[in-house]
Amino acid sequence: MHSGFVTLVGRPNVGKSTLVNAMCGHKVSIVSDKPQTTRHRVMGVLNTPESQLVFVDTPGLHKPVTALGERVNATALDSVSDVDVVCLVIDATKPFGSGDKWVASHLEMSKAVVILNKTDAAKQHQVLGQLTALSALGASDYFPVSAKTGAGIPELVAFLSAKLPEGPQYFPIETKSDQPEEQWVAELVREQLLAVTHDELPYSIATRVTEWEWPRIRVEIIVERDSQKGMVIGKGGAVLKEVGQLARAQLPEGCFLELFVKVDKDWQRKPDRVQRLGY
């Protein structure tokens, strides 16, 4: 038996969460086209006959301007220590730039694996050009893949599995993620909010479970201003109703999900509030 931890790092919106979901074969992390969707470190578990791979999904590394940004950056950087394989994920549709180089500067690239994601959305000459540019990083290996279509994913998983050392199963075979149920539900609600609300809201929204007495679950949605509260609720409660329906569809049958909106002014700029919300 081979087992170990594989951490994925990269800039925001390069597709790390979609990639972890694709490699695990089930949904581990929420996904969105909004940058900095992932705020927590989340582990997804893949069991094969020969190995157990524990994929570590991390927040996108960026230049922080708030206490929340500083916290999620620290979470991502802490996740590259004491793991068996570190993967730097790059977006194939965007030029290899200073942000990617900054992330790479925090890694031991000679031992890292570079994953060029979103190849389905890039032209062949873009992919080849990216791989040529990325060779300057001096990584141990390079893999062009598409988390969306699955192209290259089986080969990548087989390669990562072979790189793991001999070891025990770290999680029971039925475990799919290390995420507590409460956090999973709160994140699921936030995912649906990101899908249906306006572009100016993603960074201002936080969610947490405040009551859990199955089948009744109460989730609190925190925003920074009264105007944002109106956007989240929507006219006649339409937005909140849609979010609840979308989230409920991914929860066990019979779940009674209650959503409430609360204003906590400028919460993401206040370290104590950020910590209180679990970041």
Image: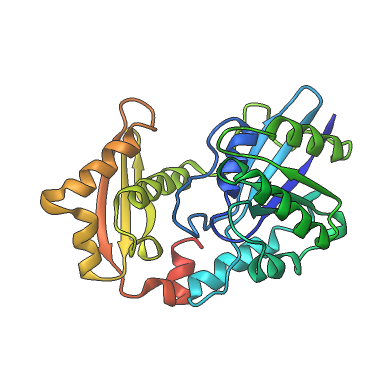
> Which residue is depicted at the point 36% across and 65% down?
204
Query: Does residue 141 appear left or right of residue 71 in this picture?
Result: right
Front-lying residue, 247 or 9: 9
Among all residues in the image, which is located at the extreme left?
A: 236
Q: Which quadrant holds residue 158?
A: top right
Most distant residue in the front direction: 125
Colour convention: rainbow
Q: Is residue 87 visible?
A: no
Expressed as whole percent of the image width and height from the top left, the position of residue 255 reads 32, 32
| In the depicted structure, whether residue 159 falls above or below residue 198 | above
> Residue 194, relative to residue 68: is it above or below?
above
Q: Is residue 91 left or right of residue 189?
A: right
Figure quadrant of residue 200: bottom left
Q: Tell me if 161 is positioned left or right of 57 in this view.
A: right
Q: Examine the rendered structure and indicate whether residue 26 appears above or below residue 163.
A: above
Q: How many marks?
A: 0
Q: Residue furthest top?
A: 49
Above or below 226: residue 174: above
Residue 87 in the image: x percent, y percent?
Answer: 74, 51
x and y percent of residue 67 in the render? 50, 75
| Nearer to us in this view, 71 or 143 | 143
What residue is at 57 percent from the left and 33 percent from the top?
149
Residue 264 occupies which quadrant of the picture? bottom left
Residue in the picture at 75% in, 52% down: 131
